[in-house]
Image (tube, helix red, strand yellow):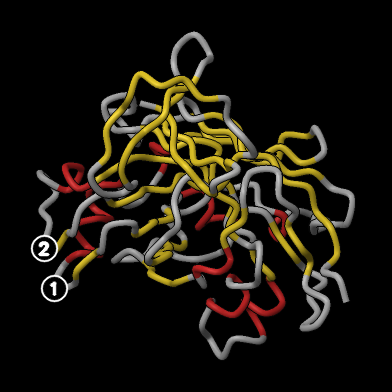
Amino acid sequence: MKIIRHLTPAGPAWAALQPDGSARALEGEVPGDFRLTDRPVTPGRLLAPVTPTNLLCIGLNYRRHAAESNSPLPPHPVLFMKNTAAVQHPGGPIQLPRHLPSTKVDYECELAVVIGRACRNATRENALDHVLGYTCANDVSARDWQRDGGGGQWCQGKSFDTFCPLGPVLVTPDELPSPNALRIRTVLNGQVMQDWSTDDMIFDVPAIIAFLSASKTLLPGTVILTGTPHGVGFARNPPVWLQPGDEVSVDIEGIGTLTNPVVEEPL
């Protein structure tokens, strides 16, 4: 099932896209108890497909990205967090920070995993049983704050408003049974910047869920960003930073394309 969250006159609602391009309403809550109805709907403006209870992120999780970062392969998944208020909708603008300025804002295409039911001490064998679905994410990053302004922590550079676009749909696991066999790309102003496969992850999706849930509870609605492949802006010569007027897209096989324009934060 391909689930969308969209804006109606009554507020946000969920629907399921059909093979013929139409949409049918979902009743209930996502995540939670929901069911597909026979009621056709005309979707309004697309919203991020889930409102995260937590935004957990894994850094340096692609072999080629670790190499371009001049970093050794980590022995365990590298966890950091983003502010849940950083979520942005498909088509919504990524705002370059100006009140707390950054001149080095970067893109990162990522596969996002959404947890559907409470998960604690999952095993590698049952980890995917807790997954509600998958979506595209852009882990937008202010490299100056990430590297030099966070006291060794990455959260500051990762948590500005609009720095976590999600969407356009949430694809359930029955349609994506192998999350570590997907082509993943970033396209900036029509130019392909990242083009790789999720099979390059150092820690695959089951390993990530098992690690994050060890002695910890992952709440329903937890969104896990699973890392980015090589080709990020900071590793290029010269570096490529997002600029006002840019358009950046994240494309993942089997999910679709998440596109956002780039603007300056209003002062």
Q: CA distance from mark 1 to mark 2?
A: 6 Å
Q: Are marks 1 and 2 in contact (CB under 8 Å)?
A: yes
Q: Amino acid at mark 2?
A: Asn
Q: Which residue is mark 2?
A: 121
Considering every residue shown, the one lying at the far top of the view is 20
Query: Is residue 10 at all visible to an observer of this figure?
Result: yes
- At which x and y percent is residue 244? 88, 56
Query: Is residue 229 at all visible to an observer of this figure?
Result: no
Q: Name the secondary structure under disc 1.
A: loop
Q: Nearer the viewer, residue 193 or 99?
A: 99
- At which x and y percent is residue 210? 19, 57
Q: Which residue is mark 1?
A: 215
Position above or below: 74 against 172: below
Say left or right for 82 vs 239.
Answer: left
Q: Amino acid at mark 1?
A: Ser
Which residue is located at x 45 percent, y 12 percent?
Answer: 19
